[in-house]
Image (cartoon, grey):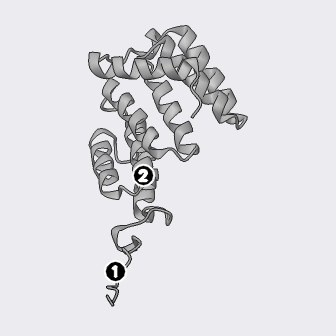
Amino acid sequence: MRFTPASIALAVLLTTVSSVGLTQRPDAQIDPLSIEWMRAGEGAAKAGDLSAATDAYETALAVDPRNRGAYIALAGVARAQGLQGKAIRLYREALLLDPTDVYALVGQGEAMVEKGAVAKAKENLAQAQKICADNCAPLGKLAAAIQKGAPPTVLSAKDAIPAPKIVPTETP
């Protein structure tokens, strides 16, 4: 794993945000430099440079740890990299700032499905349905992902490789 100054700063900030209980600032109060880094991350992600996108989003969070959008964007990059556990944690950080963020709930639910935690994803869907009107577009994505189920690469208990049988040896 490669550590950058931005990733180290993010780790410190995630710990601080979790322990201090920071709340989301209205978008108009997010530090403008953090928003600039968000735009840089969006550009890098669109160009397919997920490493640069990660660095930019982490820098956005270092500048302003209350930037919920940066957590959500960083979680999206983590999902694209196949890091669903990391994505789930980042969505959780966004939800600590605003528990009613439908995009964070849906994204986290989709990452849970991808990780094989379909039951937990259903809880996210139920929570998002309480918050959002019936015609809320992101809910349809999560509902479809739940209906589709976990990807085939996720092993269920019945698919687990059985333990080898121990065959007693004869003693002379």
Residue 165 picture location, percent across and down: 35, 81
Q: Judge whether 35 appears above or below 141 on screen.
A: above
Residue 170 picture location, percent across and down: 33, 90
Q: Which mark is residue 6?
A: none
Write the residue at 45% across / 64% down.
148
Looking at the image, which is closer to me, 133 or 107? 107
Q: Judge whether 138 appears above or below 67 on screen.
A: below
Write the residue at 52% across / 43% down.
79
Label 1, on which residue? 166
Query: Which quarter of the rendering shows the C terminus?
Result: bottom left
Query: Which quarter of the rendering shows the N terminus?
Result: top right
Looking at the image, which is closer to me, 138 or 71? 71
Q: Is residue 171 visible?
A: yes
Q: Judge whether 2 appears above or below 143 on screen.
A: above
- Amino acid identity at mark 2: Leu
Looking at the image, which is closer to me, 31 or 144? 31
Q: Earlier in the sequence, mark 1 or mark 2?
A: 2
- Amino acid identity at mark 1: Ile
For mark 1, give the secondary structure: loop
For mark 2, give the secondary structure: helix
Label 2, on which residue? 142
